[in-house]
Amino acid sequence: MARTARELLEESARKLAPDPHANRLLPLIARGAAQPTTLAALALEQRGVIAADRRAFLHLSERSRDAPASAAFFTALAEGEAMAQDRLGGFAAVCRADETANTYEPPADCQGYPAYVAWLALNGQPADVVVALNANFAAWGGYCASIAQALRRHYGFDDAACGFFDFFADPSPDLHRRAEEAVQEGLDTGRLDEECAHRYGRLLQGYETRFWHALWELDARI
């Protein structure tokens, strides 16, 4: 019996879930041990990632003209990135990120994730990219929930400063519905290659891990 889109997405999220210990920076933030300059670097990196991802999602939406469910999913992602960009300002301000913006040099490993998303925007089959992104978002949302809690508990950040992480920590039922519709569309039209989708997802998770590891290394050098 053929699987439904929901079953495929749930199975992919399980298969592609990262090692619980892969994010080496998260425990530092969770116990309030990450340096303020590391938090500022996180803000600056997210500013660049969000802008790049938004453009990539808009391009994927444009490429999905003959796949309306995929186009709707990527359009919703782009709109979400715009809202996240607004919420990031509160975190960046409290971290005083702008004071170091002119001298900050992004580590190469922090740039791997947005670079790969851009590659997917140019080369990936949209339905396959939906599967890969959905799995990655599950891990990212968990990270954001932990960070938001730690920022309040150990760093005294208020709701405005934590709004960026709260935004991603709270799963969107509408976005999940759109992901299911896009994947079902891919299944119905024969435009979804599960093996390829999992390869994309595995690489996305790898670049995500490298992102956090690079920031952990920055913190260790302070």
Image (tube, rainbow, N blue to C red):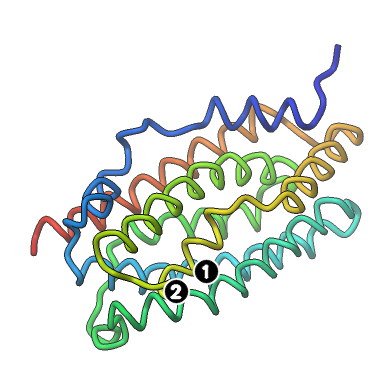
- Image quarter of residue 147: bottom left
Could you classify mark 2 by the number of other residues whose Cα lies within 10 Å: few (under 14), some (14-19), or many (20 or more)? Answer: some
- Asked if labels 2 and 1 touch by Cβ distance under 8 angstroms, the answer is yes
Residue found at x 16% / y 56%: 33
Q: Secondary structure at mark 2?
A: helix
Could you classify mark 1 by the number of other residues whose Cα lies within 10 Å: few (under 14), some (14-19), or many (20 or more)? Answer: many
- Above or below, 139 against 39 in this view is above
Kindly identify the amino acid type of the residue bearing the numbered disc 2.
Arg
- Above or below, 98 against 95 in this view is below
Residue found at x 30% / y 84%: 101
Q: Is residue 39 left or right of residue 199?
A: left
Q: Nearer the viewer, residue 147 or 203?
A: 147
- Image quarter of residue 158: bottom left
Q: Nearer the viewer, residue 35 or 31?
A: 31
- Image quarter of residue 187: top right
The percent position of residue 82, horizontal first and vertical second, equals 62, 74
Residue position for label 2: 47
Kindly identify the amino acid type of the residue bearing the numbered disc 1.
Ile
Structural distance between the alpha carbons of marks 1 and 2: 6 Å
The C terminus is located in which quarter?
bottom left
Residue position for label 1: 50
- Above or below, 144 against 57 in this view is above
Q: Nearer the viewer, residue 125 or 7?
A: 7
Q: Secondary structure at mark 1?
A: helix
Residue sitting farthest toward the left: 222
